[in-house]
Amino acid sequence: ANHHYTLGIDFGTSGARAVVIDCTGVTQAEAKYAVTDDAFTQVITWENTLFNLIEQIPPRLRQQIDAIAIDGTSSTVLLCNATGTPVAPPLMYNDARGVTVLEQLKAIAPPNHTVLSATSSLAKLLWLSQQPTFADAKYFLHQADWLAFLLHGKLGISDYHNALKLGYDVEHFCYPAWLTKLAIAPLLPQILAPGTPVAEVTPEVATRFNLRRDCYVCAGTTDSIAAFLASGATSPGEAVTSLGSTMVLKLLSHTRVENSQYGIYSHRLGDLWLTGGASNTGGAVLQQFFSNAELQQLSLQIDPQQVSPFDYYPLLQPGDRFPVNDPHLLPRLEPRPDNSVEFLHGILESIARIECQGYQLLQQLGATSLIHIYTAGGGAVNTSWTAIRQRYFDLPIVASKDTEAAYGSALLAMRSINSNRN
Ligand code: ADP
């Protein structure tokens, strides 16, 4: 038997976590670090958080960690100098200052390209290149890249999940010509497959945290892909529905599906494609009407075998993109029955209908046929909802194996060990 352990570290939008797993995927240790949004805009907080998470892991386990993978928030980026010191505060994932370079970007990138958004990594890099601090910049990195650098000391390395919105061509494994001819090209990181071993931790890091000298750090991924990996989905046709504040569908496919109209795009995942879309419908609407305790109690009173007569489109505000592309789509929550069990039933039923429509759209656009749905997010625990959804899908719907992105990153590091050994 082998006794490999890996460490996954997740930097998400609402804090950071670490998970140590063994080679059978069982969690051996967990650490959490809550950070306020404000504090997370400073790299010193990232550094302190990273080190604190590692210190929370029992020293006995730390000694057995063979590999580490880190996921970060997609499109949270920074510029640093030749020694890795940031030259300016990072730009957070939702920072839209890149809106001022969008026109410029449209003139450079192909129509409908993923980089054509005010918050894309490339829009951020272009915007940064027009700031005075740019003169000192040597490397453009994503959050996960810079955190990994703190452990392995290598600069200028990223992965093709983080780099998708930087314009990296994941089909041909290169930066496209329209990108490499730009003045910012020398700052672009080298791109590796997520999970590729990058380098061992530095001797200083090994000593300081009591890690093995030969413990290595892998190329990372994004927080949402790490959360997908945590679900346990690995085969084409397997999907994860995230029933959080909004509803996000992700389907593993042999084929790559892209459709800018519906906001559908695909990440590469080994030989497969992870395709998906995000709807504005979801738990946030439920929260508008019910407390979490009410959601639980009222859900138990629903007869999920009964079809609700209400055809809603639950939204907080007008507009959706997937599976209905209509920026003016009005929230539809009428007629509203007096009975709150019936009202809740109608909302859950309607979200299930929209979920079904979403998977149908992905398959119509060429994705591999759905065979299995894992469920994550706050709505995953609702068994009545699962039973309602089951009427729409003639296939297994189960809860995700794990929903922590940090667990997904630990799995990524474990797969790297396994493929290294073979
Ligand atoms: P986020 O997308 O904000 O990370 P979470 O995955 O934590 O969201 O899920 C929170 C959502 O889950 C809330 O919007 C809430 O309405 C919903 N939720 C919580 N409990 C239940 C429940 N028992 N049934 C259905 N939805 C629930």
Image (cartoon, helix red, strand yellow):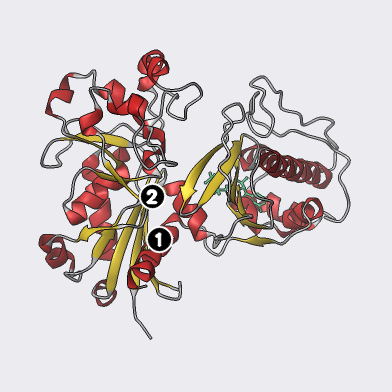
Q: Residue furthest bottom?
A: 1
Q: Is mark 2 within 8 Å of ligand 1?
A: no
The kind of residue on which mark 2 rests is Thr
Question: How far from the left and from the top, in percent, is residue 214?
Answer: 19, 69
Lower position in the chain sequence, tag 2 or tag 1 = 2
Task: Tell me which residue sits at (78%, 34%) in the image.
Answer: 312
At numbered mark 1, what does the secondary structure look like: helix, strand or loop? Answer: helix
Tell me the kind of residue under disc 1. Leu
Q: In x, y percent, where is residue 224?
A: 47, 47
Relative depth, front residue between 178 and 343:
178
Q: Is residue 42 above or below residue 381?
A: above
Location of residue 317 with respect to 107 vertically, above or below: below
249 vs 171, nearest the viewer: 171
Mark 2 touching mark 1, by CB under 8 A? yes
* Numbered label attached to residue 175: none
Nearer to the camera, 92 or 189: 189
Q: Quadrant of the N terminus?
A: bottom left
User: For mark 2, what is the residue?
Assistant: 221
For the C terminus, the quadrant is bottom left
Q: Residues within 10 Å of mark 1 (few under 14, many from 20)?
A: many
Cα distance between the residues tagged 2 and 1? 9 Å
Q: Residue at x 29, y 75 (%)?
A: 61
- Disc 2 packing (10 Å; few <14; some 14–19; many ≥20): many
Q: Secondary structure at mark 2?
A: strand
Give the labeled residue for mark 1. Answer: 412
Q: Is residue 54 visible?
A: yes
The mark tally for this picture is: 2
**Where on the picture, by quarter, is residue 178?**
top left
Q: Is mark 1 within 8 Å of ligand 1?
A: no
